[in-house]
């Protein structure tokens, strides 16, 4: 998808491309035949953008999913901007300037969303480090060295059976 | 009069729950057997009382007693009988009663099947269950009483929300609650262990079947809900990352982690403290989900309840139970001794990785779900966190997990042989690449990247088969000998392989349906045809029809392949008369594992109608995989070790030694 910000970091870019290519559900529910742009490439961009924009009067639906009047207006607006030569980013910026950040289903990274975006990464790091420390601080190198007397007793007991 | 009996039964249940909440705990402290014996009896009495109460409400629905406000608000005399039954939980009050019924049902199960538990543990577990029951009984009686009367009684009801008038409502909530609420048993076991300050492998062995059962039902409930949303909402989507979906998904993720960590604890006595914490977290997420759904704090497509007093009440329950459990954990957990040791590359190590990723994924979904709510409360700023966010973050987290799944069962306990596992999995990787390429080739086009997704699905499926293959040592031993070895494996090994296979099937379905699916939006007039997914569909026109409590306009489509008519599709727009509410009934035609999905849009001025048609190849794999996972759960549940009685006899023999070892 046209959001180029993440596509310069080697394997991360590959994974992102992978995910964006097909983990995103096929957008496309409420678009009416009369809205569709004649240029398929442009239409595809419009669909991708629509899937990221919230229908403001609906409950948790993108403008692509919704058949509300306002969603339709927004879909038409997105297509107008694209036809006028806007880049995807410009379209998003324009819609945000009119409707605010609330319209973005994928919130931008910023001061107020830092915690949201950082949570997975931070937890993964903290969890990973915690596990490493846990494994390191325990004498896991010599667990097989000797049996404790209790273990020996248990084995004897089991062998006797 | 009957209605009042139902109401009174709840009051009696509350009184019973208070007794069971307190006396058995004291009994367990003092070693007073008669006080401890109150717990199982009390649990059975509570179940009988709540079941009676639930039966009364059901009766009121079946006979359409509109003098009961709840029935009047959510039923209609002309509604089909099955919806009168399922309508009982198609509203806030009734669904809370169902929640409670299942909670006390699980308590009763512990009372009946827990005869072999040590007396003190059983008394404490049932007491903790009883605390939860008391809280929810109070909630129902004070804020959500389904037995309130209307005087004079109205002649006709207001009908059930049409979206809920579906077979899905009959199955989805009970299954979901069996899962959700089933985790309460794990929670109670964890809290009881903390109260006693003692925990061992036998404990894990008692907890695991409950976790497994709850997880299995929750898997079924979520899959069922997803399929219901898919065919009922008419958007062709099957997962929307809706807050309500997330609310049920979070306990599932945490429960999946719990399932795996309990395994480590049972087999190796390691990860004790973590397992206890996870058990508490899982049920806390169930409670949180109940709060999110029932308080109406979220604006979402599923939300039907909005009343702040209820929200605050559940929030208090949430705070007391989660806060209390964590406080208890902080106080008592240091008393629990750490258990067995293991090398990083081992079965334990792989399960720790599983837990790390699943926990982070749970936290990610949790943050994403609550973030807009918290931000708005704190700063007044409104942002949205929707599907694109979850797809990216959750998807990124799942990739390494899905790759790691086949490794786990191939590594030995304590110290695994990674090169050995790699050697076996090279073959699996090769086979999945081949399968992915073949699949892609057969599909004729689609994004090339899809091959990786398909491979990931096949990797899970073939990896699970390979696990059994190598356990039986097929290829090295004679076939008959290997078969005998395979037959000798414990059921839980099959359960693991089946569940992991199911996961692969689901992954395959997700990638196949999203990569190769097509959608067509066209305006059609009668007689017009359109080609979709290799089929040709001809629109025949609209016909009007009348159902028991709705009128509908049905569009008929003839489906042809190679000029031969193979099937019909009916897709309709309904109007439910009592509520004047329109719904879209998608027409779905199944070919093998793929589906044609037809949804009607708006009529145009020139006599045509907007039709949306999706070709969804292999979409049924998504839910089929969940069914297979479920089957894996049941197979594992039938394992001898987990069968009632078996664990305790062994545990009793083993306990003195284990205690000595601590």
Image: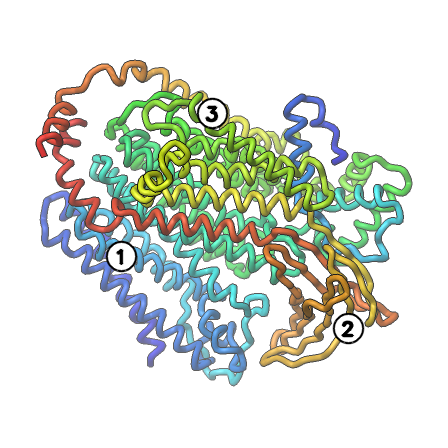
Chain that bears disc 1: B
Chain that bears disc 2: B
Could you tell which of marks 3 and 1 lies nearer the N-terminus? Answer: 1
Disc number lying in front (2 or 3): 3
Q: CA distance from mark 2 to mark 3?
A: 58 Å
Front residue (pair B527, B139)? B527
- Image spot of residue B237 (x, y percent): 64, 53
- Residue holding disc 1: B109
Disc number lying in front (3 or 1): 3
B638 with respect to A62 (left or right): left
Q: CA distance from mark 3 to mark 1?
A: 46 Å
Residue at (50% x, 76% y) in the render: B72
Disc number lying in front (2 or 1): 2
Could you tell which of marks 2 and 1 lies nearer the N-terminus? Answer: 1
- Image spot of residue B245 (x, y percent): 54, 50
B469 with respect to A161 (left or right): right
- Image spot of residue B389 (x, y percent): 63, 39
Please tell me whether mark 1 sits on a helix, a strand or a loop: helix
Front residue (pair A52, A107)? A52
* Residue B280 in sight from this viewpoint: no
Circle number at residue B540: 2
């Amino acid at each position: 998808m046209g959001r180029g910000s993440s596509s310069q970091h080697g394997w991360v870019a590959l994974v992102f491309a992978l995910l964006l290519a097909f983990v995103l559900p096929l957008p496309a529910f409420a678009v009416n035949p009369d809205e569709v742009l004649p240029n398929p490439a442009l239409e595809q961009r419009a669909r991708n953008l629509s899937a990221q924009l919230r229908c403001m009067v609906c409950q948790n639906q993108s403008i692509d999913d919704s058949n509300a009047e306002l969603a339709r207006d927004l879909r038409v607006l997105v297509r107008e901007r694209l036809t006028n030569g806007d880049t995807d980013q410009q379209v998003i910026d324009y819609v945000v300037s009119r409707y605010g950040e609330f319209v973005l289903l994928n919130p931008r990274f910023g001061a107020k969303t830092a915690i949201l975006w950082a949570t997975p990464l931070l937890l993964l790091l903290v969890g990973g480090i915690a596990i490493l420390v846990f494994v390191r601080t325990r004498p896991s190198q010599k667990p097989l060295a000797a049996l404790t007397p209790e273990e020996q007793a248990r084995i004897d007991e089991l062998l006797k059976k | 009069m009957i209605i009042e009996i139902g109401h009174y039964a709840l009051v009696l249940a509350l009184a019973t729950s208070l007794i069971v909440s307190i006396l058995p705990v004291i009994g367990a402290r003092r070693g007073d057997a008669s006080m401890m014996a109150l717990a199982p009896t009390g649990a059975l009495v509570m179940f009988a009382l709540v079941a009676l109460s639930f039966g009364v409400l059901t009766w009121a629905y079946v006979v359409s007693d509109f003098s009961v406000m709840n029935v009047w608000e959510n039923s209609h005399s002309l509604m089909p009988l099955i919806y009168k039954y399922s309508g009982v939980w198609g509203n806030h009050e009734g669904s809370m009663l169902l929640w409670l019924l299942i909670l006390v049902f699980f308590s009763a199960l512990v009372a009946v099947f827990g005869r072999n538990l040590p007396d003190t543990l059983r008394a404490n577990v049932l007491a903790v269950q009883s605390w939860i029951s008391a809280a929810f009984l109070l909630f129902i009686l004070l804020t959500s009483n389904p037995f309130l009367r209307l005087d004079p009684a109205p002649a006709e009801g207001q009908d059930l929300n049409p979206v809920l008038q579906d077979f899905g409502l009959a199955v989805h909530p009970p299954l979901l609650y069996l899962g959700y609420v089933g985790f309460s048993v794990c929670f109670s076991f964890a809290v009881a262990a903390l109260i006693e300050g003692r925990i061992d492998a036998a404990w894990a062995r008692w907890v695991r079947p409950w976790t497994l059962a709850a997880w299995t039902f929750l898997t079924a409930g979520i899959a069922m809900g997803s399929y219901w949303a898919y065919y009922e909402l008419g958007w062709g989507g099957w997962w929307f990352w809706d807050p309500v979906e997330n609310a049920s998904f979070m306990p599932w993720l945490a429960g999946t982690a719990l399932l795996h960590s309990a395994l480590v604890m049972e087999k190796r006595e390691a990860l004790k403290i973590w397992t206890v914490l996870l058990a508490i977290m899982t049920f806390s997420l169930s409670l949180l989900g109940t709060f999110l759904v029932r308080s109406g704090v979220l604006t979402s497509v599923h939300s039907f309840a909005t009343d702040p007093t209820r929200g605050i009440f559940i929030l208090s329950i949430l705070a007391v139970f989660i806060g209390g459990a964590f406080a208890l954990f902080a106080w008592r957990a240091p008393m629990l001794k750490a258990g067995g040791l293991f090398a990083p590359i081992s079965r334990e190590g792989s399960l720790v990785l599983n837990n790390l990723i699943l926990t982070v994924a749970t936290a990610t979904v949790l943050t994403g779900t609550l973030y807009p709510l918290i931000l708005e409360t704190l700063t007044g700023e409104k942002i949205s966190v929707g599907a694109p966010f979850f797809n990216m973050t959750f998807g990124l987290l799942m990739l390494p997990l899905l790759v790691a799944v086949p490794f786990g069962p191939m590594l030995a306990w304590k110290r695994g042989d990674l090169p050995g596992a790699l050697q076996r999995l090279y073959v699996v990787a090769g086979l999945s690449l081949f399968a992915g390429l073949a699949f892609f080739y057969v599909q004729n086009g689609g994004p090339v990247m899809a091959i990786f997704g398909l491979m990931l699905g096949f990797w899970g499926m073939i990896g699970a088969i390979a696990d059994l293959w190598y356990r039986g040592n097929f290829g090295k031993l004679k076939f008959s000998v290997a078969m005998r070895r395979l037959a000798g494996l414990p059921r839980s090994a099959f359960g693991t392989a089946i569940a992991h296979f199911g996961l692969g099937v689901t992954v395959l379905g997700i990638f196949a349906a999203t990569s190769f699916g097509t959608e067509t939006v066209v305006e059609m007039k009668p007689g017009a045809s359109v080609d979709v997914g290799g089929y040709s569909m001809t629109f025949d026109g609209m016909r009007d029809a009348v159902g028991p409590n709705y009128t509908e306009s049905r569009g008929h489509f003839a489906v042809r392949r190679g000029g031969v008519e193979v099937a019909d599709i009916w897709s309709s727009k309904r109007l439910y008369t009592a509520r004047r509410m329109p719904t879209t009934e998608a027409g779905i035609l199944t070919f093998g594992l793929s589906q044609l999905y037809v949804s009607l849009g708006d009529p145009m001025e020139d006599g045509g109608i907007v039709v949306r048609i999706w070709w969804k190849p292999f979409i049924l794999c998504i839910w089929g995989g969940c069914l297979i996972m479920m089957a894996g759960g049941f197979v594992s549940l039938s394992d001898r070790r987990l069968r009632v009685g078996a664990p305790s006899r062994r545990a009793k023999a083993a306990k003195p030694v284990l205690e000595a070892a601590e």
